[in-house]
């Protein structure tokens, strides 16, 4: 009887060889699911929800989050891989493939009686060597638009068809360059990703301004204006609820009317101050005033503003209250007292578009582009979702390059170089740990091998060609997915993020080591992170 069953007679237990087999099977199974998605020639997966929702994607991060994974080991690998996406924005599929291949290579040695601890020590030494190879292969370049375009193209090309990838490459690069400020970290929240179920996906564009997903509520408000001042405020222009639970008592209708009139007067005074500012800056000119308010604007206030030609938008999202001053200039104000011209922003063009029940407000020709909008269009929901997921990955890839100021050769060149260099260094590793290092060197080749397989090429022939080219010339070479020939990724502009590869080498081997060292899997009845069931 196992020790845990003395403590809890109902405990479920899987021991030693069975536990290892359980982990190996899960890692290999998850690898087989995602294997066909890797690279620009990878296939798509169709996810169908319980209510019939359909999602087409080849993004490993989306697949792992949306799939219902019940196996505990597979779920752990999925969580670790998606954690990489949250940290650096890419590398999910590569992580799953590498972990699965490390386990597959380890299985060969375990079958011959090698202890898992020996293999784990070998993985540790191989990882240290691989990180040194990464430092020698990274290319430190001056960050310019051309470099960022190449990185974005490499990232988006693995997730979208070539035509859309090419279009979005320029959009995401220009968006990140627009919001970047010297000496400040890049805040991707300042890029709004807005979608409109309208026209074709090729009509997706970068708006160097703002697109708001609501419009004016007054029927007489104009839908197009030029040369507009923008007042961004957080002022209550409707009846306010008291902050404490209070009651008002009156003995006749006259007292009630006085109370109502005093409330109305307080709101009207705020509206009059906004109207006075409009008259001060716009009278005698062709300029207009747009008021974007975070709080409510009641119908009476809307009518007062509309009579003066002021466009009023209410219930603006809080995040837009940060973006509007960054794009249009001016200040976000919390009081109608002491309003000045300095508080006003500027937009050269205002337009309101209605699609069914939805309204969209465009503020363009703004003086600053420290906040901008990527407007995604598409004829159906799954196209829009696919584009949104790809845009997020593209934005992260461009931002990572600006932070790292370095890139790594793509197209499987890095993995081939690590494998070749490891096999040279293996001679210096003493003892059985050498077996673990050899397993690591063979496992990392899963990336170029899968790229070749997914392109319909002979993977063995392609791999042998890449290895021999690297050994002869000592220059990183990758696989051309069109014809299988060896290419120089640097010359072709196929570049990966340095931080993604670094995270890839830190995460996958560590998780594979932990899974190899598991000798018992117990379900002992206690709720993890909570109380007893």
Image (tube, rainbow, N blue to C red):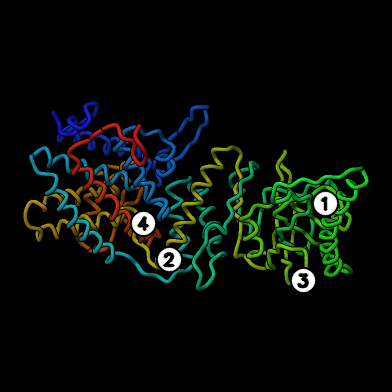
Which residue is label 1 attached to?
302
The residue beneath circle 2 is 403
Using the numbered discs, state the Cα–Cα distance from disc 3 to disc 4 in whole angstroms. Answer: 47 Å
Query: Dot 1, how many residues are within 10 Å of its Cα: few (below 14), some (14-19), or many (20+)?
Result: many
Q: CA distance from mark 1 to mark 2?
A: 46 Å
- Residue at the outermost right position: 254
Give the label on residue 341, or none.
Answer: 3
Would you identify the image quadrant in which residue 247 lies?
A: top right
User: Contact, CB < 8 Å: mark 4 with mark 2?
Assistant: no
Residue 466 is left or right of residue 94, and the answer is left
- Mark 4 lies on a secondary structure that is helix
- The answer to the question of whether label 3 and label 2 lie on touching residues, with beta carbons closer than 8 A, is no
Residue at 46% across, 55% down: 153
N-terminal-most mark, 4 or 2: 2
Evaluate whether residue 238 shows in this view: yes
Using the image, determine if residue 208 lies above or below residue 114: below
**C-alpha gap between disc 3 and disc 1:** 22 Å
x, y percent for residue 5: 19, 30
* x, y percent for residue 225: 79, 58
**Based on the displayed image, in which of its 4 quarters is residue 308 positioned?**
bottom right
Label number found at residue 500: 4
Q: CB under 8 Å between callouts 1 and 4?
A: no
Which quarter of the figure has residue 262? bottom right
Horizontal placement of 101 versus 173: left or right? left
Q: Which part of the image, by quadrant, shows the N terminus?
A: top left
Q: Which comes sooner in the sequence, label 1 or label 2?
A: 1
């Amino acid at each position: 009887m196992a020790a845990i069953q003395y403590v809890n007679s109902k405990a479920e237990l899987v021991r030693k060889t069975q536990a290892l087999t359980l982990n190996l099977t899960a890692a290999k199974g998850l690898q087989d699911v995602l294997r066909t998605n890797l690279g620009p020639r990878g296939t798509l997966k169709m996810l169908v929800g319980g209510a019939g929702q359909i999602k087409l994607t080849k993004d490993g991060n989306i697949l792992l989050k949306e799939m219902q994974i019940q196996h505990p080991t597979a779920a752990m690998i999925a969580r670790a891989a998606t954690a990489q996406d949250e940290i650096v924005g890419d590398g999910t599929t590569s992580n799953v493939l590498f972990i699965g291949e490390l386990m597959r290579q380890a299985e060969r040695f375990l079958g011959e009686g090698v202890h898992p601890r020996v293999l784990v020590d070998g993985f540790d030494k191989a990882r240290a060597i691989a990180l040194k190879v990464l430092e020698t292969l990274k290319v430190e370049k001056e960050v310019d638009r051309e470099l960022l375009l190449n990185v974005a193209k490499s990232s988006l090309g693995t997730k979208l068809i070539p035509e859309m990838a090419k279009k979005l490459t320029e959009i995401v690069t220009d968006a990140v360059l627009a919001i970047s400020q010297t000496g400040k970290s890049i805040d991707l929240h300042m890029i709004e990703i807005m979608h409109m179920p309208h026209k074709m996906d090729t009509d997706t564009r970068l708006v160097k301004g703002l697109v708001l997903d609501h419009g004016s509520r007054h029927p007489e408000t104009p839908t197009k204006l030029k040369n507009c001042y923008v007042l961004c405020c957080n002022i209550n222009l409707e009846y306010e609820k008291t902050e404490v639970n209070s009651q008002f008592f009156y003995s006749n209708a006259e007292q009630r009317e006085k109370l109502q009139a005093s409330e109305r007067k307080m709101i009207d005074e705020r509206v009059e101050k906004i109207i006075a500012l409009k008259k001060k800056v716009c009278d005698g000119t062709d300029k207009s005033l747009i008021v974007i308010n975070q709080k409510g604007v009641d119908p009476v206030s809307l009518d007062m503003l509309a009579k003066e030609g002021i466009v009023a938008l209410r219930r603006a999202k809080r995040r837009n209250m940060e973006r509007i001053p960054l794009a249009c200039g001016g200040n976000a104000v919390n009081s109608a007292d002491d309003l000045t011209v300095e508080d006003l922003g500027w937009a050269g063009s205002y337009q309101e578009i209605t699609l069914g029940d939805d309204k969209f407000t465009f503020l363009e020709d703004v003086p600053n582009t420290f906040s901008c909008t990527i407007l995604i269009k598409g004829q159906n929901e799954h196209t829009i979702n696919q584009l949104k997921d790809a845009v997020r990955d593209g934005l992260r890839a461009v931002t990572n390059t600006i932070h790292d100021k370095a890139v790594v050769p793509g197209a499987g060149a890095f993995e081939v170089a690590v494998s070749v260099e490891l096999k040279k260094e293996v001679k210096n590793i003493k003892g059985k740990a050498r077996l673990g290092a050899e397993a690591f060197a063979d496992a990392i080749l899963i990336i170029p091998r899968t790229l070749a397989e997914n392109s319909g090429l002979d993977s063995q022939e392609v791999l042998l060609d890449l290895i021999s080219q690297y050994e002869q010339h000592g220059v990183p070479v990758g696989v051309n997915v069109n014809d299988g020939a060896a290419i120089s990724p640097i010359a072709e502009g196929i570049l990966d993020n340095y931080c993604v590869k670094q995270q890839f080498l830190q995460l996958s081997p560590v998780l594979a080591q932990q899974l190899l060292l598991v000798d018992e899997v117990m379900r002992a009845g206690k709720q993890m992170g909570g109380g007893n069931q």
